[in-house]
Image (spheres, rainbow, N blue to C red):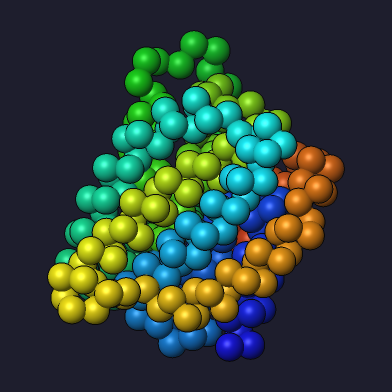
């Protein structure tokens, strides 16, 4: 389980400084590090994202950093999109799921490199559209949805930068909760409670992530926005190259 523990350290660092649940790291690496199928990687990633983002939200709410109202608005449509995506996930081949992962990472990098110019008066309902897009990506790719929702929500002036990481943690928690419930239901119906979720490996990743995020949470506000963005671009770019290699 050494590989899982090291992966957990990386997940903790990324989560505490960016607000992402860590799926952006786990899904590309789980198949090669822990010999999981792509479906298992997606389901296990979302299980860890649920645990990790929940504990981050609890800390953030205690410090009054989560914009719950805006988080719920982003999450509402995303819940249904995540549920639907998690159900249809089983219809895709391994290669198709890897392709979707590569496209999602590319989209996230594109949004980071070419951010939407902040729109003063965003159209009504744009929060629900962004949430639905993020929830769909979350259920199909296991990334959690934050890498998509964060840049879009900021560009459309739905979330301020100071509340970005905690509020996106809340959104990814809701997405991951609905997707994990779907995988558990499918598992129970198939006679296997956990279904495609490799829970032992998931816990082995989560525990180091929990220790790191708890230890470094106080440093979250001290990270400059430019550095936070540069970290995201570098991480997503490296993992996008890794995902491309898996489909070629």
Confirm whether residue 158 shows in the render: yes
Q: Where is 4 relative to 180, above or below?
A: below
Q: Is residue 220 left or right of residue 115?
A: right
Quadrant (top left/top right/bottom left/bottom right) for the C terminus? bottom left
In the rendered image, which quarter is residue 25 located in?
Answer: bottom right
Q: Is residue 133 left or right of residue 122?
A: left
Confirm whether residue 89 shows in the render: no
Of the pair 239 and 192, the residue shown nearer to us: 192
Name the residue rendered at 27%, 42% in the picture.
80
Of the pair 187 and 132, the residue shown nearer to us: 187
Q: Where is 235 relative to 200, above or below?
A: above
In the rendered image, which quarter is residue 154 located in?
Answer: top right
Name the residue rendered at 35%, 40% in the picture.
78
- Furthest toward the front, the residue is 62
Name the residue rendered at 50%, 27% in the picture.
70
- Furthest toward the top, the residue is 121
- Residue 96 placement (x, y as % from top left): 28, 68
Name the residue rendered at 55%, 22% in the picture.
157
Quadrant (top left/top right/bottom left/bottom right) for the N terminus? bottom right
Q: Is residue 195 left or right of residue 72?
A: left
- Residue 201 placement (x, y as % from top left): 49, 80
How many numbered marks appear?
A: 0
Q: Where is 36 relative to 213, above or below?
A: below
Q: Where is 119 relative to 67, above or below?
A: above
- Residue 225 placement (x, y as % from top left): 75, 39
């Amino acid at each position: 389980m050494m590989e899982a523990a090291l992966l957990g350290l990386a997940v903790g660092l990324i989560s505490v400084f960016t607000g992402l649940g860590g799926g952006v790291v786990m899904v590309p690496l789980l198949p090669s590090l822990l010999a999981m199928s792509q479906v298992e990687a997606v389901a296990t990633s979302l299980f860890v994202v649920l645990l990790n983002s929940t504990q981050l939200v609890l800390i953030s709410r205690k410090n009054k950093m989560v914009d719950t109202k805006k988080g719920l608005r982003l999450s509402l449509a995303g819940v249904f999109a995540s549920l639907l995506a998690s159900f249809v996930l089983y219809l895709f081949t391994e290669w198709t799921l890897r392709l979707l992962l590569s496209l999602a990472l590319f989209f996230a990098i594109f949004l980071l490199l070419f951010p939407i110019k902040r729109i003063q008066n965003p159209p009504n309902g744009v929060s629900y559209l962004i949430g639905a897009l993020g929830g769909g990506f979350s259920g199909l790719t296991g990334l959690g949805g934050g890498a998509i929702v964060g840049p879009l929500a900021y560009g459309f002036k739905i979330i301020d930068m100071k509340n970005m990481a905690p509020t996106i943690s809340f959104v990814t928690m809701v997405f991951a909760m609905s997707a994990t419930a779907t995988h558990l239901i499918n598992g129970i119906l198939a006679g296997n409670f956990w279904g495609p979720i490799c829970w032992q490996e998931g816990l082995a990743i989560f525990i180091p992530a929990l220790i790191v995020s708890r230890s470094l949470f106080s440093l979250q506000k001290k990270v400059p926005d430019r550095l936070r963005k540069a970290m995201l671009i570098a991480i997503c770019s490296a993992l996008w190259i890794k995902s491309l290699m898996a489909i070629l």
